[in-house]
């Protein structure tokens, strides 16, 4: 389903759900990403979203970036109990101990993964789904590949990376193009994915 955006062009229906969604939809969602910091940030924000709306997270994204040192892996992995206590007092983010501790844990696990795989991007993109698996846009909330990636991350010690969270990550970071068939952005994402050099 689509809605007509401010320019009269059709966009994915969810993009009309809140202020700021159109810009995020048009410039970020679905475009392929190979930057380790952005990939890690997205894993973290998707984890914080669990049980909440994306609007809540997007509205607080700059606060999350400030609270977690721009999602610098080395810095976040070094956070201690005093940092957790401080973050639990930060009204600008989601003050959920489990999710905060998961972010710190996942930073350390991401560093382990980078050491073994070369980069977070190389690891993530080796889980790009086979085109034959990709469903009709926005028809699913998870997939076999998302489930497999979730299981592997959990085996590596990551937290708050369930299959639905991982599928949302894959949609947002461009591992699949889940824009609606008649969405004005879909063709641009297809072109970006075609030109995107997969990290090795």
Image: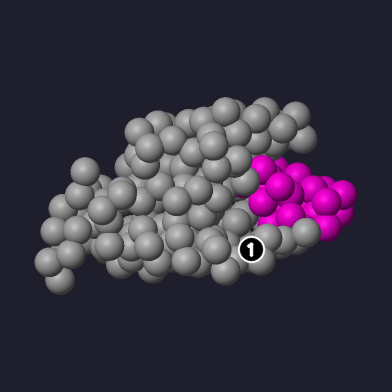
Q: Check the image and tell me how it is coloured.
A: one colour
Determine whether, in the image, residue 177 is placed left or right of residue 163: left
Q: Quadrant of residue 155?
A: top right
Q: Which residues are the magenta region?
A: 103-127
Task: Please give the name of the residue rendered at 72% of the width and 32% of the height, measured from the top-left corner.
Answer: 152
Query: Is residue 138 something one can see in this rendering?
Result: yes
Task: Where is residue 8? Give x, y as percent.
Answer: 12, 66
Q: How many labels, in total?
A: 1
Q: Residue furthest front?
A: 132
Determine whether, in the image, residue 164 is placed left or right of residue 6: right
Task: Where is residue 111? Give x, y as percent.
Answer: 78, 53
Determine whether, in the image, residue 100 is placed left or right of residue 7: right
- The prevailing secondary structure element of the residues shown in magenta is helix
How would you rate the neighbour count of disc 1 (Cα within 10 Å): few for under 14, some for 14-19, many for 20 or more? some
Task: Please give the name of the residue rendered at 19% of the width and 58% of the height, measured from the top-left corner.
Answer: 10
Task: Please give the name of the residue rendered at 18% of the width and 64% of the height, measured from the top-left corner.
Answer: 9
Q: Quadrant of the C terminus?
A: bottom right
Task: Say above or below: 192 vs 169.
Answer: below
Task: Say above or below: 44 vs 35.
Answer: above
Asked whether residue 60 is drawn in magenta, I would say no
Q: Quadrant of the N terminus?
A: top left
Determine whether, in the image, residue 109 is placed left or right of residue 88: right
**Pick the front one: 154 or 33:** 33
Task: Where is residue 6? Give x, y as percent.
Answer: 14, 68
**Pick the front one: 17 or 76:** 17
Query: Is residue 47 something one can see in this rendering?
Result: no
Task: Where is residue 135? Give x, y as percent.
Answer: 44, 35
Which secondary structure lies at badge 1? loop
The residue to which callout 1 is attached is 34
**Pick the front one: 107 or 200:** 200
Q: Quadrant of residue 199?
A: bottom right
């Amino acid at each position: 389903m689509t809605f007509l955006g401010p320019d009269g062009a059709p966009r994915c229906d969810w993009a009309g759900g809140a202020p700021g969604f159109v810009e995020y939809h048009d410039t970020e969602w679905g475009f392929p990403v190979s930057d380790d910091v952005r990939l890690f940030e997205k894993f973290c924000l998707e984890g914080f979203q669990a049980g909440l709306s994306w609007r809540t997270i997007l509205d607080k994204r700059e606060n999350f970036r400030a609270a977690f040192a721009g999602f610098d892996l080395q810095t976040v992995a070094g956070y201690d109990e005093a940092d957790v206590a401080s973050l639990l007092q930060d009204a600008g983010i989601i003050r959920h101990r489990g999710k905060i501790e998961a972010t710190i844990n996942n930073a350390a696990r991401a560093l382990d993964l980078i050491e073994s795989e070369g980069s977070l991007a190389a690891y993530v993109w080796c889980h790009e789904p086979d085109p034959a698996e990709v469903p009709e846009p926005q028809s699913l909330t998870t997939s076999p590949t998302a489930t497999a990636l979730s299981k592997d991350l959990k085996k590596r010690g990551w937290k708050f990376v369930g299959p639905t969270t991982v599928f949302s990550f894959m949609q947002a970071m461009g591992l699949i193009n889940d824009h609606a068939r008649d969405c004005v952005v879909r063709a641009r994402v297809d072109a970006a994915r075609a030109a995107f050099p997969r990290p090795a």
